[in-house]
């Protein structure tokens, strides 16, 4: 339908509450008067800057009646019984025709990946990103598409990682602080601060809401090991759905209590391992062996949950599902904490390894990216 919409509307036919638009390639779409009145883009109905609606839908939409509908130069013009006039341009019609045909609004496309990425990771240079808005746009677009990207060669100063987050938004402060350290400590209360390997996980599933972005910067790395491991949770979820829809359904409808506590905080949240969009595609993944609770329910339900959970872990932990690389001092990796799982190989007690990290919000990244893409149009 999008191709037909792009070809331009040729004519409109009003039948009762419905306007049928016919396009140059023979495609057509039906739009209802309620949505058309609610969606009127004119300056009387929408704020000229924000685009926010200036009227209360409940007060205007129910009784709105279309008197006439016509197409002029690809633009739909509607005359309403109360004297209001709506004009819908080609871009608006193209978007609505596509949404009507698909039954949903289009989402930003993503690329699912595994080990086939090899060393061809999405990487930009820090010096480029801070000085060239095109490079910043490429870097943010890579995060949106792949769920992660690397920024190479950033200064290894304290809290540089927070400055990187502020290139597109704000740092989300938690009980770990604005910026947190990941390094070996004898009195560690978190396994991340030991030299042990860490299994694939997402962070902070025990928090409401879960942080949507995580940034980690390598400050020191002169110990053997400690490679970063990433896996695309959405790819694993889609693979599980293809192989066993029932198991995916089990993980999506069973809440698990995640928790964390120390002397300064006690946190918990009940979320399923997998959250799905209405069309069944993945929305979020919550996997953390260290902080997950156990499923509640009958022995049969518990058995089914564990079978599904272990199958998802199997899909994530296969070598073909992972990319493995070493963060060098200065490198920053940012990843979608609701999609991309991260892990770390163990490292030697000889030498040292220190990372700094922070959390940020994905909506800020996407907003900045949208503004940069608007500039490029």
Image (cartoon, grey):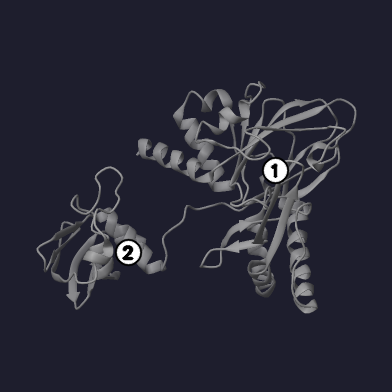
Q: Position of residue 165 (x, y in %)?
A: 56, 33
Q: Toward which corner of the image does residue 355 lie, by quadrant?
A: top right
In the rendered view, tell whether residue 149 sits above or below residue 313.
above
Badge nearest the viewer, 2 or 1: 2
Say which residue label 2 marks: 97
Q: Which residue sits at x=30%, y=61%? A: 5
Q: Which residue sits at x=51%, y=68%? A: 279
On screen, residue 1 versus residue 320, left or right, reads left
For label 1, count other residues whose C-alpha is less than 10 Å away and answer few (under 14), some (14-19) or many (20+).
few
Depth check, front residue: 49 or 271: 271
Quadrant showing the C terminus: top left
On screen, residue 31 versus residue 67, left or right, reads right
Label ID, residue 334: none
Q: Position of residue 50 (x, y in %)?
A: 31, 45
Report helix, strand or loop for mark 2: helix
Say which residue label 1 marks: 118
Q: Which residue sits at x=67%, y=52%? A: 205
Query: Which tag, 2 or 1, sits closer to the chain's start?
Result: 2
For label 2, count other residues whose C-alpha is less than 10 Å away and answer few (under 14), some (14-19) or many (20+).
many
On screen, residue 36 versus residue 325, left or right, reads left
Quadrant showing the N terminus: bottom left
Q: Toward which corner of the image does residue 253 lie, by quadrant?
A: bottom right
In the rendered view, tell whether residue 132 sits above or below residue 293.
above
Depth check, front residue: 170 or 285: 170
Depth check, front residue: 67 or 256: 256
């Amino acid at each position: 339908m999008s191709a037909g919409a792009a070809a331009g509307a040729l004519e409109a036919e009003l039948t009762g509450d419905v306007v049928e638009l016919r396009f140059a390639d023979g495609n057509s779409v039906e739009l209802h008067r309620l949505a058309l009145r609610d969606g009127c883009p004119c300056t009387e109905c929408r704020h000229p800057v924000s685009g926010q609606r200036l009227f209360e839908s409940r007060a205007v939409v129910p009784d709105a009646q279309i008197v006439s509908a016509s197409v002029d130069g690809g633009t739909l013009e509607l005359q309403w019984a109360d004297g209001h006039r709506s004009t819908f341009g080609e871009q608006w019609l193209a978007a609505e025709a596509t949404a009507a045909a698909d039954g949903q609004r289009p989402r930003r496309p993503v690329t699912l990946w595994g080990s086939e990425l090899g060393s061809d990771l999405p990487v930009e240079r820090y010096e480029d990103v801070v000085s060239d808005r095109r490079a910043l746009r490429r870097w943010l677009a890579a995060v949106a598409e792949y769920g992660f990207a690397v920024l190479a060669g950033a200064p290894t100063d304290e809290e540089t990682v927070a400055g990187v987050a502020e290139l597109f938004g704000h740092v989300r402060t938690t009980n770990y602080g604005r910026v947190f350290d990941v390094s070996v400590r004898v009195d560690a209360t978190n396994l991340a601060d030991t030299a042990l390997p860490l299994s694939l996980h997402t962070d902070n599933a025990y928090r409401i809401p879960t942080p949507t972005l995580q940034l980690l910067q390598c400050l020191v790395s002169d110990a053997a090991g400690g490679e970063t491991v990433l896996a695309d949770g959405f790819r694993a979820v889609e693979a599980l759905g293809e192989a066993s829809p029932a198991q995916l359904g089990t993980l999506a409808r069973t809440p698990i209590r995640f928790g964390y506590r120390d002397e300064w905080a006690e946190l918990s949240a009940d979320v399923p391992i997998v959250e799905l969009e209405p069309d069944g595609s993945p929305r979020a993944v919550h996997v953390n062996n260290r902080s997950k609770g156990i499923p509640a329910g009958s022995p049969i339900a518990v058995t089914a949950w564990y079978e599904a959970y272990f199958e998802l872990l199997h899909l994530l932990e296969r070598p073909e599902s992972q990319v493995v690389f070493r963060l060098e001092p200065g490198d920053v990796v940012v990843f979608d904490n609701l999609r991309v799982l991260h892990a770390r190989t163990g490292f030697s007690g000889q030498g040292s390894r220190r990372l700094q990290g922070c959390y940020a919000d994905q909506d800020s990244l996407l907003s900045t990216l949208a503004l940069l893409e608007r500039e490029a149009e």
